[in-house]
Image (tube, rainbow, N blue to C red):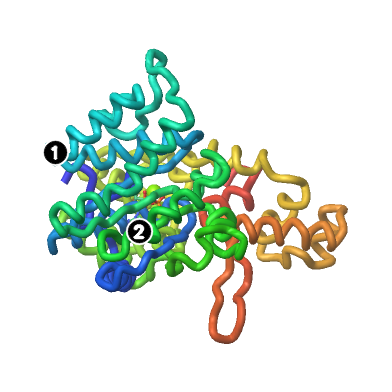
Amino acid sequence: MLRPFPFETPIAPDALIDRREELHRLSQAAAERVHVRLAGPRRFGKTSLLLAHAEGLRGVGWRTVHVDMYGVTSLAEVCVRIATSYARLKDNRLRAHLDSLGGRLGLSLTPAGPGITLGPRQRVPSPEATQTAAAELLDLPLTLHERDKIPTLVVFDEFQDLLSAGPGLDGLLRSHVQYHADAAVYIYAGSQPSLMRKLFSDRERPLYGQAEPLELGPLPADEVLVELTERFEELGEDPAGVLSPLVGVAAGHPQRTMLLAHLLHRELAARQLGSTTLPEGGEVEGIAFADAVVRRALATTHEAHQGVWDQMSAGKKAVLAALADHDSPTGTTTARRFETSRATLQSALRDLAREGQHVTRDEGPSGAGPWRYVDPLLELWVRSRGRPL
Ligand SMILES: Nc1ncnc2c1ncn2[C@@H]1O[C@H](COP(=O)(O)OP(=O)(O)O)[C@@H](O)[C@H]1O
Ligand SMILES: [Mg+2]
């Protein structure tokens, strides 16, 4: 086990904690050929979940493609992303088809992996050629289904970035997808709730009502604790008294959970060799140990938090600071403390909530719960900004 607690890239299906219900819903949707839009904050495990789902479907004979739309800026680039995803299927006939399509476009559609872009020596295809290629690529599930009757799962990951690739692309997509009936099922995954809503919940948009929503929330604390305890046991390490408070700090945020577990594991492994990774030294135990691990984590995430903070308006900073201090984000005390008006705070909170990146709240049967941070480490950073922890 090279990295028993992976925290950087999407993780292998067998490393997933929980998500059983989500996987069940996704496989049901596939069986019924219902399209799904999967929304959740960044690093909540959308890609990992979808990789596990795809693996499951391949096991029952499906073809699966995973198209990452992250950062696309043009339809030609969308074409390259789709083509490279299909090229990974290792289907020679399909590969030849893609090569000839690429030849017509003057683009390289070979599977050089994600991140492939239009190289400097490639000519920019004409808009008509790109449109034709896009149509062919979008209809591939249909073409392939006619050939072998195998259905395709098409995942469009970071789907909201399609909005930056050009106007009307959601319309283009819909005009093809709607005829794919038995041939394909689509999952649109996105990490910017506001943009995803714009694409799917606005009556004016072509994809309105075209996919069932599935929200990816935090991981359940008890499942996390049981699973991580087992993993530490397999490693021959004893995290007693430290793991539980760390799982509490992570508050179900999947990536933060794994980051903290990783740092704890690193320290425990160092201690077995008579060394330490903590400035506090290898003697700290219990809560003090957990605190030291959290500080270690904040040292790695500090720059990212600072980047987030620096982008915020004064109103948003006030709301975030109040929330981090467990004050009412739009109350009179907060308004007075930050020398602003309650109206400004209310509008800032509305914006933060709409964007859905940093604050959220649970919708229960008895109404909405209190606002809280999506990322518990950002909360700690904001609480302690400018002060040593
Ligand atoms: N179900 C899970 N169990 C354990 N860790 C998870 C899970 N989901 C996500 N993670 C952690 O979060 C990180 C980011 O996951 P990823 O699938 O890339 O998220 P997203 O696609 O939502 O940005 C992973 O590296 C892993 O550490
Ligand atoms: Mg992802």
Dot 1, how many residues are within 10 Å of its Cα: few (below 14), some (14-19), or many (20+)? few
186 vs 161, left or right, is left
Residue 157, horizontal then vertical, whole percent: 39, 49
Residue 286: image quadrant is bottom left
The answer to whether residue 279 shows anywhere in this view is yes
Instruction: Tell me the element at label 2.
Output: strand
Marked residue nearer the N-terminal end (1 or 2) = 1
Front residue of 324 and 313: 313
The answer to whether residue 238 shows anywhere in this view is no
Q: Which mark is residue 93?
A: 1
Instruction: Tell me the element at label 1.
Output: helix
Mark 2: which amino acid?
Tyr
Relative to 31, is 116 above or below?
above
Front residue of 349 and 158: 158
Front residue of 237 and 168: 168
Q: Residue at x 50, y 51 (%)?
A: 170
Task: Please identify, in this view, whether the residue under mark 1 or under mark 2 is nearer the observer.
Answer: 1
Mark 2 lies on residue = 186
387 vs 67, left or right, is right
